[in-house]
Amino acid sequence: MPKILLTLIAALLLVSLAEAFHLDLYEARVPPELLEKLQDMDNPYLPTPERVDAGQLIYFGKGQCVTCHNIDGKGMERTGHAPRDFTDAKWQETRTDGELMWVLRNGSPGTEMPVRVGKVINEEEGWSVIHFIRTFDQSQ
Ligand code: HEC
């Protein structure tokens, strides 16, 4: 096969891999047509210490978040696709609670992030675990 063709195939493969793995960590995970609405959606609960504790229990317990997102929120090493680093201040700032709720309800399509709300936890527990995830933010 001509070398140029091989190079072309390799380049195409790289592009599709980059897309599949969402190499840009800051790019929104929610469908573009919902983004504005989700950015306006507030967490209906206040981040009281009790609420954050409840979120922590879910993270380490029935939500099974810790199995992929790790004890420190930095994410496990996984083949192909690493979960988010919740200690990344830029990521924390970029994402709104409404967007995170969408991901908990729908998973992150094309990745290992599974549906959580409606499956293993309910809405209120979802909002609590979001408050807990915010505590990984190192700029706070
Ligand atoms: C089987 C592994 C797995 C489990 C269990 C899991 N996650 Fe994830 N999660 C991922 C992966 C992989 C990503 C990265 C997805 C992406 O890049 O879009 C992710 C991404 C996320 C994100 C970031 C989405 C964004 O908009 O950037 C949040 C928030 C999240 N997970 C929360 C949770 C919570 C809360 C739980 C538990 C209730 C949980 N995850 C359980 C693998 C997992």
Image: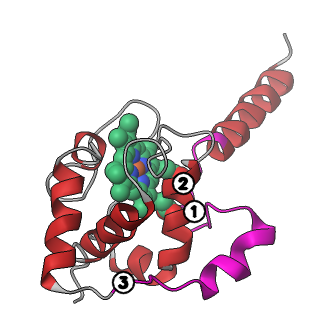
Residue at x 33% of width, y 62% of height: 125
Which of discs 2 and 3 lies nearer the camera? The answer is 3
Tag count:
3
Q: Amino acid at mark 3?
A: Tyr
Residue 77, placed above or below residue 89:
above
Image height of 119 relative to 49, above or below: above
Image quadrant containing the C terminus: bottom left
Residue at mark 3: C-beta within 8 A of ligand 1:
no
Q: Disc 2, disc 1: CB below 8 Å?
A: yes
Query: Would you name the residue on which mark 1 appears?
Result: 102
Front-lying residue, 17 or 51: 51
Marks 1 and 3: in contact by CB < 8 Å? no
Disc 2 residue type? Arg
- Of mark 2 and mark 3, the one earlier in the sequence is 3
- Residue 89 part of the magenta-drawn span: no
Where residue 113 sits: x, y (%)? 47, 44
Q: Earlier in the sequence, mark 3 or mark 1?
A: 3
- Residue 109 % position (x, y): 62, 44
List the residue tagged with mark 2: 105
Instruction: Tell me residue 7's x, y (percent).
Output: 76, 29
Specify start and end residues of the magenta stretch as a single range.
20-45
Residue 105 point in image, percent of width and height: 54, 54
Q: Is residue 83 visible?
A: no
Quarter holding the N terminus is top right
Q: Which mark is residue 45?
A: 3
